[in-house]
Image (cartoon, rainbow, N blue to C red):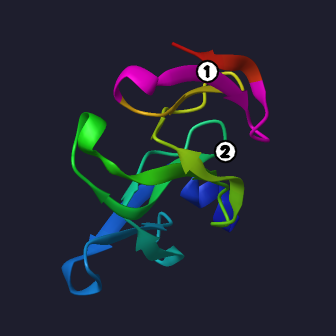
Amino acid sequence: MSQNTAISTKVAVFDPKEGRKWGFVNKQGTLVVPLQFGKTSFFHDGLAAVCVGPCTGYGDSFEGKWGYIDQTGKFAVNPQFDEAELFRGGLARVTLGKGTQKKQGYIGTKGAFVWTPSN
C-alpha cells in the first residue's frame, strides 16, 4: 500500500513534548507528516486543513492562519485564511477577516476563489 493511500484515512497525532504540535501517521503508525501544525482537520478530497502560528483562541479571538496540505505534507494552498472547512467535491468554504470584516467564499483545490468572499 502506498504512503498516500495509507494516510488518506488520516490519523493526526500530537506530542505534548513537542509543544502540542500535530502531524499525521499512516495505518502502520509511522509518522509521515512531521509534528509541525497547531491544529489540523481530516484529509478529504486529498487535502487537509492545517493551522500555522499560535492557533489559539476561539471565534474572533482565534490566532493563526489556515491553509491546506496534500498527503505528502506539502502546502497545496498556503496559509492565509482565518477559518477553513473540509474540501467536498473539490470546493472548500474559507473565511477571511474577523468580526464585522468577516467574509466567506469558496476555493478550489489549487486555492483560487470560485466564489469571491462576501459577508
Q: Position of residue 103 (x, y in %)?
A: 52, 22
Residue to which mark 2 is pinned:
46
Dot 1: few (<14), some (14–19), or many (≥20) neighbours within 10 Å?
some
Q: Residues within 10 Å of mark 2 (few under 14, many from 20)?
A: some
Q: Which residue is mark 1?
A: 105
User: Number of callouts in the render?
Assistant: 2
- Relative to 103, 107 lies left or right: right
Left or right of 109 in this view: 98: left
Check the image and name the residue furthest to the bottom: 17
The front one of 7 and 78 is 78
93 left or right of 24?
right
Q: Which corner quadrant of the image does residue 102 belong to?
A: top left
Chain-order first, disc 1 or disc 2: 2
Amino acid type for the residue under numbered disc 1: Gly
Q: What are the residue bounds of the magenta stretch?
A: 99-113
Residue 84 on image: x %, y %: 49, 36
Residue 51 lies within the magenta run: no
